[in-house]
Structures are given as C-alpha cells and as structure tokens.
Image (cartoon, helix red, strand yellow):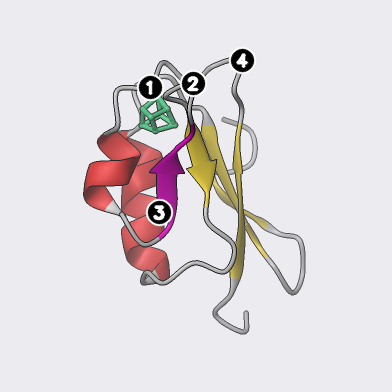
Amino acid sequence: MDGRVRIRVDHGLCVGNAMCVALAPGAFAHNADRQSEPLDPYDEAVDTILDAAASCPTGAIRVEDAGTGEWLFPPRGS
Ligand code: SF4
C-alpha cells in the first residue's frame, strides 16, 4: 500500500454525531446537513482515519487502499 486511502461515508447511515470529525479533523468535516464528508485530499495519518472509522457508531465509514482498492475497514466479511 502506498499510504493513501480512499474514504467513503454512507449518508444513509451517518447520524452526524461528529465522532469522526473530532477524532480525525484532517479527514472528515460536516456538511450543511451535519453529515460527515471525507476530505480529499486529507491530512491525517491512516491509522487515525482507521480509528475514526472504527469509532463510528453506525458503521457509516469505509476505507480502502487507494492503490489496490483493498478494503481496510471494515474488514471483509464483517
Ligand atoms: S462518526 Fe459516523 S455517524 Fe458520526 S458523523 Fe462520522 S460518519 Fe457520521
């Protein structure tokens, strides 16, 4: 992996509690509807992004390797 990831937020699941914004403000920001939007480009360590994804109470965040497309979070099969 080259260190870059692609982040997706499912707005059908996001409840806007801002956990991801608090944990990884360089990678997520709220839009006018108080839903999380991934920032592109982001300025955050990948581990921090993965921690934020894992902290989302509704599982709205998916993270994949930008180079290979491999899902990094959630793990495949979950
Ligand atoms: S932590 Fe999850 S539910 Fe909360 S704002 Fe971020 S994506 Fe939305």
Instruction: Tell me the kind of residue under disc 2.
Output: Asp
| Crowd rating for badge 2 (residues with CA inside 10 Å; few <14, some 14–19, many 20+) | few
Q: Quadrant of residue 68?
A: bottom right
The disc, 3 or 1, on the residue closer to the chain's N-terminal end is: 1
Report the residue that reaches farthest toward the right. Answer: 68
- Number of the front mark, 3 or 1: 1
- Say above or below: 13 vs 56: above
Front-most of residues 4 and 15: 15
Query: Residue beneath label 2, please?
Result: 33
Query: Residue beneath label 4, please?
Result: 12
Residue at x-position 54% and y-position 16%: 13
Label 2 and label 3: CA atoms lie apart by 24 Å
Q: Which residues are magenta?
A: 27-31
Q: Main secondary structure of the magenta part?
A: strand
Instruction: Tell me the kind of residue under disc 4.
Output: Gly
x, y (%) of residue 44? Answer: 37, 69
Which quarter of the rendering shows the C terminus?
top right
- Number of the front mark, 3 or 4: 4
Residue at x-position 40% and y-position 54%: 50
Front-most of residues 43 and 30: 30
- Number of the front mark, 1 or 2: 2
Q: Which mark is residue 16?
A: 1
Q: Which mark is residue 50?
A: 3
- Does any atom of ligand 1 lie closer than 8 Å to the CB of label 1? yes
Q: Secondary structure at mark 4?
A: loop
Instruction: Tell me the kind of residue under disc 3.
Output: Leu
